[in-house]
Image (tube, coloured by chain):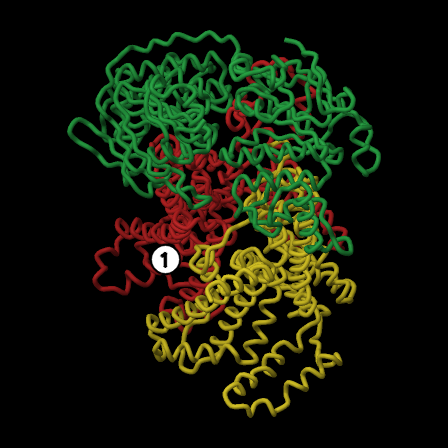
Amino acid sequence: MSSVDIKTPYSGSRTPILTINNVSKYFPGVRALDDVSMEYYPGEILAILGENGAGKSTLMKVISGLYRPDSGSISIDEDWFRNNIESGALTGTDLVNPRFTMELGIGMVYQHFQLVEPFTVYENITLGDEITKYGFVIDKKASIEKVRQISEDYGLPIHPESLVEDLSVGLKQRVEIIKQLYRNSELLILDEPTAVLTPKESQELFATMRKLREAGKSILFITHKLNEPLEVADRIVVMRQGKVVGETLPNKASRESLAEMVVGYRVQRKLDRKDLPTGDVILKVEDLEVIDKFSGKNAVDRVSFELHKNEILGIAGVQGNGQSELVSSIIGMEKIRDGFLAMIEGEKATVLNNLSIMERLKHAISYIPEDRNKEGMIPNFSVSENIWLAYQDLETDAEVATGETQQRSFLSMFTIPINLLGKLARLVIDRFNVKTPSSETKMKNLSGGNQQKVIVGREITKNPRVLVINQPTRGVDIGVMQKIHEEIIKLRNSGTGVLLVSSDLDEVLTLSDRLLVMYSGKIVADGTIEEIGMERLSHLMIGGKEGEE
Amino acid sequence: MSLNIGALAADSRRRRILVLAVSFGLSFLAMIILILVLNILGTSVDIFLVMDKTFFEPLRKPKMVALIFFWTAPLILTGLSVAIAFKAGLFNIGSQGQMMVGGAAAGIFASNIVPKTQALQFMNRPLIMIPATMLVGVLAGIIWGGIPGVLKAKTGAHEVIVTIMMNQIALSFVRYLVVSQTYSPFVDKSTGDAYGQTSAISKSAEIPLINSSFSTFLDWSIVPTILSAIIIWYLVEKTRYGYRLRAVGENISASKSSGINTNFAIISSMMISGGLAGLAGALQVQGNYHKYIFNSEGTLGFDGIAVALVAGNSALWIVISALLFGYLKQGSLNLESSTDISKFLIFTLQSALIIFIAAPLISSKLVSLTEKISRPRNVESEVNGMSQDNGGGTGGEDTEGGEI
Amino acid sequence: MVADFAQIKKLGKQIYGISLVKTILSFLIAFEILVVYLWILSATLGLGKVYNLYALNIFVFRESIDTTMLRSTVSLSVPILITAVGATFNERAGVINIGLEGILIWSAWFSVFISYTTGNIWLATLGGIFAGALLGFFHALLTITFKAEQVVTGVAVNLLALGVTEVLNRAIWEPARSAQVESFSPVDITKIPFIGDFYSLLILSNYYDVPGIGGVFRWLPDIFNALNRHNPLVYIAIFLVPICHFFLFKTKYGLRIRVIGEHPQAAATAGVNVRLYQYISVTLSGALGGLGGTILSIGVSNKFISGMTGGKGFLALAAMIFGKWTVIGGALASVLFGFFFAFGIDLSAGGIKGFVVPIEFYQMIPFIVTILALAGVIGKARAPKSIGIPYSEDEE
């Protein structure tokens, strides 16, 4: 779809101040940006909408100078920027590095705050361009005054002397915005600003954005939430898989039309989900509480649910609402503060709270962590050694999986069973189509997708009773995603209870038999998608209350 | 913090050897520069004399070559000591102190405790005394290495500083035991304060020479040494314990989440590390000096670091590496005895080597330059599939939230 | 009341960067541990009389405020102090430098060398500082540009410095020691008019007749005397402490350095040249360490002896950690370590009558305290968040 002829209500002229010309950016194995072209006009709020993986963040990083485009260019209207800034001559239109773009007047507010926690607000804001006496001594009074002045001028209340670590997420973001205003940014780019905000804070942010627009600033913001552009943007550009697929105005669009553009005409894969009666309860969680290390408050706030055999229970929710802590505490990486967690086997209930991780693994619980590089694999180890990570003291599982029985000898208690491991590695590699020269290749030489296949494969072949997965298909392409989904369903069909966490709502909905919706550490809904309904689901995910519109 | 010592992490064996060779070359160069500086400062140094005494003299006579083997044995053990801690991601600089307490304990045990205690006289025969004394040395080393291990596991106290402190404490403590004429019951009081040693150990604890007519330096302690190397190699590469150790050293998070008891790995590896160094100390006492002499360790503990790094922390390569450093050590002694140059010249070479191995970018950039000249790079493969040098898995795909 | 206390605490934190209350508490704990340690020693080694704990406390306390003790404390702690202050800079910038011991020994030797060849002690001082800065720069080069593992490099630098000084020393003089060289002579600071008047005020006997507090005032001249008649480098070093504190906490450069250690990315996106600041911090820390080494060799003594640094570089590191990565905290902790050293020397020279413990056990004290400090027994501390991680621009 090409650019629609749009009248932008807020610009005097129709000359764009920022033009993206056929920009492409590649990473190994991935086309992050594919011939993207866009125009940006002054004084408007432009929303760039797209799913995770659409290329929005990469585009922003290219604009801010953090990445260089592999082809194409970005041009800016120097005069427009120059008129708004007192600084000296800036030549060239290649946006070279963050400092340059900052001097130009383009301010990035990153999704992950670039704030130094133990320091004060004014220190964070003035960093790099400090207000000084005699040229090098920090003028605390003047700095505080300047921050206060900006804060008043734009209606963004903040205490300059507070420590950043004491601030709420919404206020931290405000500090980031003020930081850009301090540097006389004319164009503000906000990368997924509402990702970590509560609904109330999001509303406050939108109000701020409107205020800034009144004050003559231009805003570009990135989001994946369908409602936001409709609420606050003047113009909407939609991206999908590295391309621009559409452009529209809020008064001409609706959630449905946007959703169509964002998701595209994707064929819903048929998954072989047998219609099985839900089995018995296998994992019971009651009033579970897990502390968030940084804030001291509960990341998981009295959560209760049951996981059954033959069931995939999906946890839907925006990342950062306690899902990761919940899952980590089930496997034992995080401590449980209160409540209990138990495996139910027939008549017996085994409380897991105080068991070590290895002991839990011995109860046939498997875990696939969300950050494979940090927690899931050892890059310098071979593929088979990484597979062994899951099996270590669980001989019998390995034997069952491969159908081989090991000779038990005194020595075998201490040594690694090489033959068995070899067969195990072959099994995983073949069944999951892992592309690797050999089972002894180092894990780091595999592509991300193949790495994930090994990690998922080693856990699934164990045939666990409970499988806990966090982000099963992060950073993998469609083919790998499909394979992993198939295997998860197969596992579920054979009796396993699967607890699934994913920030990809599509994935959660496709795979799950039943859903839990998590918000701010609590479970706010528990049922099938038919019972909950899509509207209510999205509503609850962003923190809407029951009965609210 | 996983201990990613640059050169060791290089991918292909060929590359690793090249980088090592270049590092050696650069260190050698550094040594030459030092000699030149000496010349400038007025001490005339004949470079050829230096080279001859250091590198050729040790190989001239069989007796000289025997001396190389003499040094190799303790270097193997201290090298193993450092290496096994490295495998678990820990930097044990305490082998010096661990060797010291091991030697002192063994010396005191065999020279004072057993001979003077009536109840223990049954032990006073070679079959029991030799292994018993070795065991005492090992145990002392285990304790001295275990303490930093426990502190690291339980409190996160950085093992580098703690082991260095333990070295200093060992220095004082052993000094009290073996030098302090006034207070220590173990000192050989006949020699006077300056010499600091225990009295001779019981004959039953001595490890005999292999062939006294050939060399008065080569004794049978080479046997437990080589055995240790083989055992450690097997332990690290083939056993489940070794696997867990290596996993913890590579990625402690992933190890934890797969159920490995990381505390146990850390503590036990430090204990083994200390025990090996302690054994080195005991063997020196039993095989060579037949008593414990204060500070007889010289720099053997620190040399172990270089030995381990050059060998890439691999137990079997350590034997070769120890041979090399034994050779260098003997050369340095020759140098010192026949010129005005301190034996520390070789120590300097070793330290420069550690630097180049730890900062491989220097050497590897040189290697890359030569590679670039000989082989043009394939751009296409970088874009589409797996990149040559590092896994495509970390390239742009694994950003937070799956965003690209 | 409670609110005020919190205010005071926060104020203290703001002024000195550390919580005064916690620091004083840590010191008291350390002192008590020392006493208990001595008590255990005397009880187990069975030499001389065994005191009861309370009496021992009194003895140790009295012993500590003796003028000679205080003098030694000052001379012994200053080299550690200036090195610890230097270390604060590079750690705050996110670079670990374990090579402090190497910097100390190398600058100690080099300053002796310059004094030997030129006979000029001030030139020698500059030489020592330069030597330290050079080694610091070398470490920076290896860890920042070549991204070497910082800990390993630090250890290697230590060994390298040890090797090179031995080789050079032996070639020029003899193994393990140098000839005597020109060194600093003590300075009587009462000669400076302002301070001289202050001193004469102190020794006025009238104050001491005031009951109760009079006893306290009696110590003042003793303390002053302990601080007097040191070599001029000591005073320079002490003077540098508040300057460094001011620099690190009150100037924009100090702010940037501290930010780099916590969140280098935030500094980079704010346009700060991370590499440059890291280089400067590490080199500066080397220079300060160089001053420390110079004090050791030509300030307090007049020659170079092998091993004269005796672990002081590591103690400086521990002092910095103990002082929670602040300049003032590190300085105070260094004084504490100096005190332990001085205490050991004093006691083994027969300080407390009848209390017999072999000197080696005193020598161990600073090292044991360091280990306890690292293990968090004497107060937990948090390092700069991004320390030890080489910063590279292409990481997000």
Between residue A139 and residue B41, name the one nearer to us. A139
Whether residue A300 sits left or right of residue C209 in the image: it is: left
Q: Quadrant of the C terminus of chain B?
A: top right
Identify the residue at image location x=62%, y=79%.
Answer: C224
Q: Position of residue C300 (x, y in %)?
A: 64, 70
Amino acid residing under circle 1: Ala
Q: Position of residue C231 (x, y in %)?
A: 68, 72
Q: Is residue C289 depicted above or below A190 in this figure?
A: below
Please identify the residue farthest to the right as the structure is shown: A89
Q: Answer whether residue A14 is visible to the viewer in this image.
A: yes
Identify the residue at image location x=57%, y=90%.
Answer: C208
Between residue A211 and residue C43, name the one nearer to us. A211
Q: Specify few, some or many for label 1: CA neighbours under 10 Å numbering under 14, 14-19, or 20 or more.
A: many
Whether residue A176 sits left or right of residue C347 in the image: it is: right
Marked residue chain, label 1? B
Q: Is residue C329 depicted above or below A86 in this figure?
A: below
Quadrant in the rendering for residue C325: bottom right
Between residue A538 and residue C108, name the one nearer to us. A538
Q: Is residue C196 depicted above or below B48 in this figure?
A: below
Chain displayed in red: B
Whether residue B66 sits left or right of residue B101 in the image: it is: right
Identify the residue at image location x=67%, y=59%.
Answer: C246
Q: Position of residue A24 (x, y in %)?
A: 66, 16
Q: Tag 1's secondary structure?
A: helix
Chain A: colour as depicted = green
Which residue was labeled with disc 1? B105
**How many marks are shown on the rendered structure?**
1
Q: Is residue A36 depicted above or below C260 in this figure?
A: above
Whether residue B61 sits left or right of residue A247 in the image: it is: left
Chain displayed in yellow: C
Q: Position of residue A191 (x, y in %)?
A: 60, 29
